[in-house]
Image (cartoon, rainbow, N blue to C red):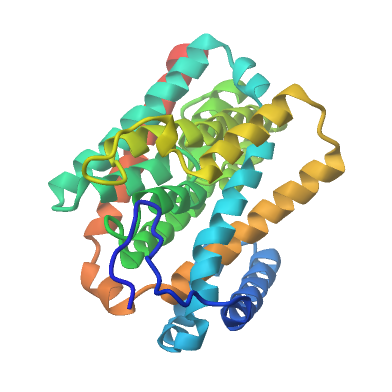
Amino acid sequence: MPAVADLYGELYEPASAPSLRDHIPGLIVTAFATLAAAYLSDHYGAPLTLMALLIGLALNFLNADKRLAPGLAFASRTLLRAGIVLVGLRVTFGQMGELGPAALAAILVIVGLTLGAGILAARAFGFSAAFGTLAGGAVAICGASAAMALATLLGDRRISQAQLALVLVGVSAMSSFAMFLYPIIAHQAGLGDTAAGFMIGASIHDVAQALGAGYSFSDHAGETAAIVKLTRVALLAPVLAVVAIFFPRDKGASAGIAALPWFVVGFFALAAVNSLLTVPASVSNVAQTGASALLACAVTATGIRSPMDSLLRAGARPLLVILAATLVALMLSALGAFTLIG
């Protein structure tokens, strides 16, 4: 039986590793469950990641079937990493430059302080710094995608499937709530289009909800929110690099670039390609659709694999950590909008 987990959440398997045929049942279940989530998301306007997670949790009883284990593990790990790599084609270095140095510096500060707030809140509520990094990083960067990437980096030794599922639920729910609430706050505060777009893009967790909130305010606010939000997405790889330094692979392992997993390097590489070359729109659309599909499959598999008894025992305290980071991100984003743009 597997006994030890490494930094990236991979278990040391026995000599007879699962074959390709062993993966098929779990992958089929994951695929059909994700298609059901996509149908609900498309017809009811709900976030795909939230629907994928809820359906995965509803199918949690399938986790007892050992025949599904290899495919579910492959979906929640390998497909996730491939999706993270494809996310690199959503951003360019030029998008960050368009904001100007002051706005870029503000985004860096917001991301850093939000991540720090998650860690401090986690410690205050009796959780580990690793859980605070997971929750704070999900709020600070790009919601469920960042949570999945950070959980992969931190590994099963530091982050359990139950904790990851709680963060995914909390971040998706709060991001959906923010999509409706934050434009109202921006209107009540008298913010202009650019300032409102900055506040929304710098504070809402998931990309889709940030863009939806921005465009519900105005077209110009939506464009600004998109650039700001994608700049936060681009910070995923640097944050992963920093997390890898503070949470090294082994007790005596040295930190540095060599500790970066392949999916971080791939993210950087595709972002550089998207920045230096003109990627055809068809290729970009396929990559974006593929990234969304792979990440949704990974979220579904994570929901199926989550231990429900641990989820129920956790209570509301983990959600308070996410809420604390969310409020810090909102306050800092609003301050930045008033100070930099007015």
- In the image, is 296 to the left or to the right of 249? right
| Residue 105 in the image: above or below residue 28 | above
Q: Position of residue 30 (x, y in %)?
A: 59, 75
- In the image, is 229 to the left or to the right of 131? right
Most foreground residue, 242 or 97: 242
- In the image, is 133 to the left or to the right of 62? left
Q: Residue furthest front?
A: 15
Report the number of numbered marks. 0
Q: Position of residue 330 (x, y in %)?
A: 40, 35
Q: What's the residue at 60%, 81% (across, down)?
A: 29
Is the N terminus in the top left, top right, bottom left or bottom right quadrant?
A: bottom left
| Residue 129 in the image: above or below residue 104 | below
Residue 331 occupies quadrant: top left
Q: Position of residue 228 (x, y in %)?
A: 57, 28
Most foreground residue, 329 or 163: 163
Most foreground residue, 202 or 183: 202
Q: What's the residue at 47%, 46% (across, down)?
A: 146
Q: What's the residue at 60%, 83% (across, down)?
A: 25
Q: Residue furthest top?
A: 101
Q: Position of residue 213 (x, y in %)?
A: 59, 42
Most foreground residue, 239 or 109: 239
Determine if residue 48 is in view: no
Residue 230 occupies quadrant: top right
| Residue 5 in the image: above or below residue 128 | below
Determine if residue 241 is in view: yes
Q: What's the residue at 66%, 60% (across, down)?
A: 293
